[in-house]
Image: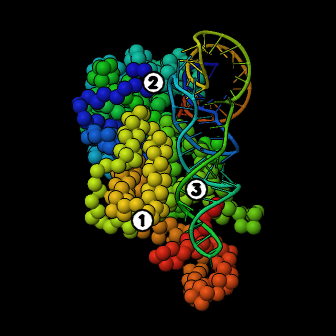
Amino acid sequence: MHRAKVAFEPLAPGEVGMYVCGPTPYAPAHIGHAFSAISFDTIRRALQFLGYRVRYVRNVTDVEDKIIKRANELGEDPMALAARFAADYNRDMARFGVMAPDVEPKVSTHIPEIIALIEKLIANERAYAVDGDVYYACERFAPYGKLSGQSLEDLRAGARVEVDERKQSPADFALWKAAKPGEPWWESPWGKGRPGWHIECSAMTTAHLGVTFDLHGGGKDLIFPHHENEIAQSQGAYGEDTFARHWMHNGFLNFGGVKMSKSLGNVFNCDQIADAVGGEALRFFCVEHHYRSPVDFEVEEVRPGGEGAVTGVRFRSLEAADRRLEKFYVTLQKIDRLVGANADPGAEITEVAQLRATAREGLADDFNAPIVMAALHVALTHANRLLDETKGDKALRKRSLAQLAAALREVGAALGILADDPARYLAARRDRLVARNRLDVPRVEQLLADRAAARAAKDFTRADAVRTELAGLGVSVLDTPAGTDWTVQDAG
RNA sequence: GGUGCCAUAGCCAAGUGGUAAGGCAGUGGUCUGCAAAACCACCAUUCCCCAGUUCAAAUCUGGGUGGCACCUCCA
């Protein structure tokens, strides 16, 4: 193991087994969850684009301290609460174009595997039982700390937690916790209890991908201790040549340079984001950055009149991303209208070949999505150029445009973007902007009708006056060969 | 105290030894009754600073400066 970018060679040619740490569902999913899910979903899609068959496993940690705590606060059954928020999570992620995992294992349905693994660790003398708890003995696993670059001595020196003196070493962590009143429990060789955090991932990777598999992903924050402990558990049980062959950790999202935290009031739920700017805008924003980088995210509190209480929030970075996304859909719509459904694409044009090649190279080099985005922009410009052209072979132009639209969508699919129907996307976007600006649509339509009448009468002074009035409302009037349309200005 | 990450134009953002992708904003132009969109052109002799290695450095090494994260629940 080394902590650098390395060449990827799957265990089985053409196939990738991938495990991603999923949610602990105890509250609505927030944008950080989405950010992580989108990162690894993009990697999954990119691998598929590159021709791999991917088996994608993402767990749900449905037995955990936070769930139990929250359930007790609400007087709800912990398992029911976890199931409820897990369903919400999947619904939210779907809005960001995150594909459902092939397998979504849960702790609650893998208790026998977890118990068997703990027994194996005890048999290997890597773990010890005390009063119904079972702990992992970190000092008996020599490579401990390899992933995070920490040593047990360093960890001990910086320990900020109270040490439980039943543990042999402060770094030891619980594999099994004896049941306390009001907690869900299962029978085990150590009495009634439940799994600790970390052990489920070791048990479930083995159950669904085998003792050794290709990729393991999760948020940067999970490197230590979660992933370090997973390694200790799995390799402690099955040998040091097992478990994940490659690790990937996504960077975190910050807001104005500040980390997201509940106390700062900058935790935004997924549905709030998707309602405000559309799910695809967040997706688009994410793939404009490299998955490893921390990403800063601009939000602005809305205070009516410039002071007083905060009544809302504007997601400036995402609004801007949505403006960029709109350009793609506008062009795709133009192409669709011009070309129709059954266009013969003909031989591949150079621009399309270049887009596909750049996408392959970019994604093959540590999933460099921004490179692919740049290539999409180049292709978009070329498509617009062809749409503007009025001279030359019309059939050839149509074939080229059909190819470009297909390639934009195909490469877009590798990033999880551009899958929507352009008309539907554009209508939804306008609806959002109408709602945000509290536009009076009947009034807008009345003004548009007035302007049309003035134009028909060649009263351009009157027509321009109406345009100015509409602009004052935030409406742009678009005269096109197909008639007059309107959009809502979204200059920020 | 320990372990890492980051610093590229007004802004966002790729690029890890071969002479700075892409986007947004801006400026000029084409098109348009006027607009918008689109298109065309322009827009970093330079990559936080200093020293070093090299024929060659944004990229490597050493030393600074500034920012961030993890070591405790966190995506």
Dot 3: chain letter: A
Residue A5 is situated, as x and y percent measured from the top left of the image, at 43, 26
| Vertical side of A16 occupied by A100: above or below | below
Task: Provide the residue designation for mark 3.
Answer: A320
Q: Could you tell which of marks 1 and 2 lies nearer the N-terminus?
A: 2
Amino acid, disc 2: Ala
Q: Could you tell which of marks 2 and 3 lies nearer the N-terminus?
A: 2
| Observer-nearest of A408 and B19 | B19
Q: Secondary structure at mark 2?
A: loop
- Write the residue at 45% across / 64% down: A390
- Write the residue at 45% across / 53% down: A382
Spatial separation of the CA atoms under disc 3 and disc 1? 20 Å
Q: Is residue A422 something one can see in this rendering?
A: no
- Write the residue at 25% across / 36% down: A15
Name the mark nearer the viewer: 1 or 2. Answer: 1
Task: Provide the residue designation for mark 2.
Answer: A4
Amino acid, disc 1: Gln
